[in-house]
Amino acid sequence: MSLALSMGLETVLYHGYEATGDITGFPNIGTYLIFGIILVPIYIMVISWFAGEPRDTKTGMLGVSYLVGIAAQMWIGMFILTVIIGLIFYGGMPEPLGAAGPSTDSPIFGFL
């Protein structure tokens, strides 16, 4: 009974999705869309800080460092949150840090 319930919950939680074949986090169409089209105004803004008039390199570098700091804070925070969610709900580290695919020894199924 416990095994059947465990398999049923696993089916509901994973919805039949398989691992992404070691490409999680690497470029796909969404990455190209965000960095190639959506961020174009940001690229123009940063270029204008250094190529426009009046030109102030110190203020431009301050702006670039703020942008890098904000982006790093978001990426690192989401990475840590992804690892925590993987450990709690999926029983292991997310790929490519851990094994690909769902784990049957998830802490969620420990009470069954």
Image (cartoon, rainbow, N blue to C red):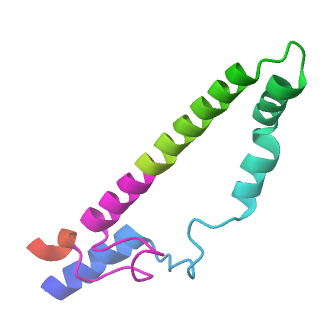
Residue drawn at the location 69% of the way across and 20% of the way down:
59
Count of numbered tags: 0
The residue furthest left is 111
Image quadrant in which the N terminus is located: bottom left
Residue closer to the observer: 92 or 60:
60
Residue closer to the observer: 32 or 66:
66
What's the magenta region? 78-106
Image quadrant in which the C terminus is located: bottom left
The question of residue 62 being in magenta is answered with no
Q: Tell me residue 24's x, y (percent).
A: 56, 70
Q: Tell me residue 91's x, y (percent).
A: 27, 73
Residue drawn at the location 56% of the way across and 41% of the way down:
71
Instruction: Give left or right: position of 109 versus 92.
Output: left
Q: Is residue 31 above or below residue 74?
A: below
Q: Tell me residue 80's x, y (percent).
A: 37, 54
Q: Is residue 66 above or below residue 35?
A: above
The question of residue 83 being in magenta is answered with yes
Asked which quadrant contains residue 5, the reply is bottom left
Instruction: Give left or right: position of 74 versus 108.
Output: right
Instruction: Give left or right: position of 26 versus 112.
Output: right
Instruction: Give left or right: position of 50 versus 83.
Output: right
Q: Is residue 47 above or below residue 104?
A: above
